[in-house]
Amino acid sequence: MSSSSPEDQDRKQQKERCDCCCITGIERELKKLESQVITVVTKNDIEFTGRLIRVDSYILVLRDIDEPIPTFTYVSLCEVSAFLFITPPAS
């Protein structure tokens, strides 16, 4: 019998499935863009745009830039196929 919880086992399986050098590279490049507005494209061609407020080795968190009430989107780094830095318009 295993002493770890089902959540721990799920996280370990997720890490084993997508833990490779590209995830480390994606995380490193995204960290450079923290607090910037980016668009993330997932492997299913779903796009999310928002201000990057956090990234770690598992997920990135975007905050919606147009909503008066903060809305957060969580995306698994394993699902990221591309991301684009959105240059803010000149004022």
Image (cartoon, grey):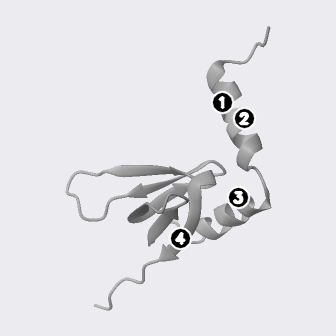
Task: Please tell me whether mark 1 sits on a helix, a strand or a loop.
Answer: helix
| Residue shown at the point (65%, 61%) measured from the top left | 27
CA–CA distance in space, label 2 to label 4: 25 Å
CA–CA distance in space, label 2 to label 1: 5 Å
Residue 17 sits above or below residue 33 on the image: above
For residue 81, what is the image quadrant? bottom right
Q: What residue type is labelled 1?
A: Asp
Q: Do the residues labelled 2 and 4 touch (CB within 8 Å)?
A: no
Residue 77 sits above or below residue 8 on the image: below
Numbered label attached to residue 13: 2
Looking at the image, is mark 3 or mark 4 earlier in the sequence? 3
Query: Is residue 71 rendered to the left or right of residue 77?
Result: left
Numbered label attached to residue 83: 4
Query: Is residue 67 rendered to the left or right of residue 36?
Result: left
Can the viewer see residue 35? no
CA–CA distance in space, label 3 to label 2: 15 Å
Looking at the image, is mark 3 or mark 2 earlier in the sequence? 2
Numbered label attached to residue 10: 1
Q: Position of residue 86 (x, y in %)?
A: 43, 79
CA–CA distance in space, label 4 to label 1: 26 Å
Can the viewer see residue 78? yes
Q: Where is residue 69 in the image (x, y as percent from the top left)?
A: 22, 51
Circle 3 sits on which residue?
Answer: 23
